Image: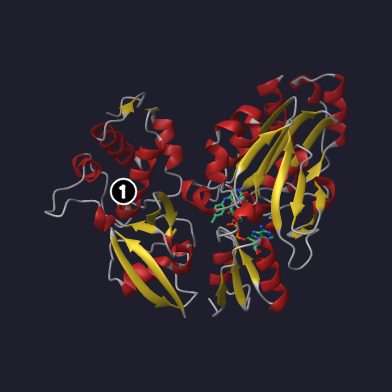
């Protein structure tokens, strides 16, 4: 690691001010992505602005049909939250499948979506459940938040504060895990929401995306069979040593079918 | 340099550290607590697992400054002062939960956290394997580790269920 300074602001305003004073700084949440990146000398921030002391980023609340999770809440706390489990079991299931216990004890919701790794799980929940991302400056709809591989709508210095997930009528997440890293080779969130059917896919493409053909079929007939003849074209999907794009395209169907079967 | 106060194995320590100092290096190099191992240094193997405020974390993926004000427990705190092994350690010895022993400190720290997470539930083989995903072992093939953890958990008062004839 290159040397860096370290700041631990106590409020969102102080964190924003720390960044405004030093725009080569980086926010630090759980560090489960950032610290490995620093160790590999892939980034050289002048300072880390640690978000751990920010109360505004903490806590889980359920009210008026919406589950709101602070950006600083770790995956383990979402996984074991009785409130989340009751309101949106698919979200607790998703959090329980991120990485391993040690990663879940440190890694946070905010860090995951700000990083927007193409194989991360949370983007599928944010888009699949039509969540809203509340930042230090504004509210961003799920559809506008993830803009490309490792890219988001966040501006420099803008903080994710919390994410609100409207409770769906039913939802399920299925993931084909990379057996070594546990990241999603393909992960699919299927949800029946007040606004309609949603199928969100992570791991398969450069960035989370929806599958309108599947959504239309499920709207007509919510059953695993409804997805049987739907093919997702492999053209723009990822190909790497773990899976070809054709295999990922196939897995989307398999994971979506399993998700539907578990709640149909 | 940043001043940190960390309670390590019950003793409060203060130090002035570089922000980039990893918690594992603080433990091993500064405090000479070399029971915590570095296997991969890339967040994969869990040999560096310690407990931070009671939760298992990878000390190679945590900065010492992030532990400021917290309690850290390492493998050195597990056995009694007179050397008597903790029931989890005794179970690893009894059930061949180690061969070379390199992964063992991390395995034990993960196992102890696993037991606490599952208080009140019935521990199964599937749960042990799922919750051990952050710890790699190059020797044992895991079978004997799973067996050891089940036995250790039982000795710590946990109900242990379905173990596919392992124990
Ligand atoms: C071994 C291993 C396995 C993993 N497996 C999985 C997996 O299966 N699925 C999965 O989804 N992820 C996985 N991860 C990643 C893990 O979920 C990370 O915790 C997560 O991606 C980043 O969260 P963090 O809190 O650690 O963020 P950090 O590493 O602290 O930060 C990541 C990035 O986000 C920025 N950031 C952090 N918080 C905020 C905020 N509130 N506002 C704005 N920017 C912010 C930081 O500046 C940084 O650029 C794995 C990681 C490891 C080490
Ligand atoms: S040394 Fe920390 S995970 Fe391998
Ligand atoms: S006993 Fe050798 S690595 Fe596990």
Neighbourhood count class around disc 1 (C-alpha, 10 Å): few under 14, some 14–19, many 20 upward: many
Quadrant where the C terminus of chain B lies?
top left
Identify the chain of the residue marked 1, using the numbered disc in the image: B
In this view, the residue in front, A32 or B144, is: A32
Quadrant of the image occupied by residue A32? bottom right
Q: Secondary structure at mark 1?
A: helix
**As drawn, A159 above or below A90:** below
**Relative vertical location of residue A244 with respect to residue A13 in this rendering, above or below:** above
Q: Is residue A241 visible?
A: no
Residue A209: give x, y in percent of width and height: 80, 45
Q: Which residue is mark 1?
A: B108
Say how many tags the image has: 1
Q: Residue B162 occupies which quadrant of the picture?
A: top left
Residue at left offset 45%, top offset 73%: B21
Image location of residue B55, percent across then percent down? 42, 49
Residue at position x 53%, y 71% in the image: A39
Whether A29 is drawn above or below B149: the answer is: below
Q: Position of residue B100 (x, y in %)?
A: 26, 55
Please determine whether, in this image, residue A116 is positioned above or below residue A7: above
Q: Position of residue A159 (x, y in %)?
A: 71, 60
In this view of the protein, which residue sits in the foreground, A177 or A62? Answer: A62
Horizontally, residue A36 falls left or right of residue B166, namely: right
Residue drawn at the location 83% of the way across and 28% of the way down: A194
In depth, the one of A127 and A167 nearer the eye is: A167
Q: Is residue A163 left or right of residue A72?
A: right
Say left or right for A108 vs B159.
right
Q: Nearer the viewer, residue B73 or A173?
A: B73
Q: Residue at x 36, y 52 (%)?
A: B138
């Amino acid at each position: 690691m290159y040397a860096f300074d370290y700041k631990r602001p106590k409020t969102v305003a102080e964190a924003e001010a720390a960044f405004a004073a030093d725009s080569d700084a980086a926010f630090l949440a759980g560090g489960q992505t950032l610290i490995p990146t620093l160790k590999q000398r892939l980034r050289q921030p002048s300072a880390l602005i640690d978000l751990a002391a920010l109360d505004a980023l903490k806590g889980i609340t359920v009210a008026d049909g919406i589950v709101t999770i602070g950006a600083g809440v770790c995956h383990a706390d979402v996984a074991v939250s009785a409130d989340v489990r009751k309101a949106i079991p698919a979200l607790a299931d998703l959090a329980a499948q991120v990485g391993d216990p040690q990663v879940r004890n440190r890694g946070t919701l905010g860090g995951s979506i700000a990083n927007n790794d193409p194989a991360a799980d949370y983007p599928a929940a944010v888009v699949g459940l039509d969540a809203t991302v509340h930042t230090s400056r504004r509210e961003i709809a799920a559809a506008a938040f993830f803009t490309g591989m490792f890219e988001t709508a966040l501006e420099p210095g803008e903080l994710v504060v919390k994410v609100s997930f409207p409770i769906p009528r039913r939802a399920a997440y299925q993931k084909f895990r990379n057996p070594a890293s546990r990241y999603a080779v393909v992960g699919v969130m299927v949800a029946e929401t007040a606004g309609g059917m949603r199928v969100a896919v992570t791991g398969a493409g450069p960035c989370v995306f929806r599958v309108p053909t599947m959504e239309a079929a499920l709207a007509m007939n919510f059953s695993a069979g409804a997805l049987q003849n739907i093919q997702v074209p492999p053209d723009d999907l990822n190909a790497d040593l773990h899976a070809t794009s054709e295999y990922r395209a196939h897995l989307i169907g398999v994971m979506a079918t399993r998700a539907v079967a578990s709640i149909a | 340099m940043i001043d940190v106060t960390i309670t390590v194995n019950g003793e409060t320590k203060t130090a002035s550290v570089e922000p980039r100092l990893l918690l594992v290096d603080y433990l091993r190099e500064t405090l000479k607590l070399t029971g915590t191992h570095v296997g991969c240094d890339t967040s994969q193997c869990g040999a560096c697992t310690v407990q931070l405020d009671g939760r298992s974390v990878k000390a190679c993926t945590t900065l010492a400054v992030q532990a400021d004000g917290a309690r850290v427990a390492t493998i050195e705190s597990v056995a009694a002062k007179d050397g008597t092994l903790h029931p989890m350690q005794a179970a690893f010895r009894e059930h061949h939960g180690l061969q070379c022993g390199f992964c063992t400190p991390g395995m034990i720290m993960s196992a102890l956290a696993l037991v606490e997470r599952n208080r009140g539930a019935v521990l199964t083989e599937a749960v042990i394997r799922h919750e051990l995903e952050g710890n790699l072992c190059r020797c044992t093939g895991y079978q004997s580790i799973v067996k050891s953890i089940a036995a250790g958990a039982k000795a710590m008062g946990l109900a242990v269920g379905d173990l596919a004839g392992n124990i």
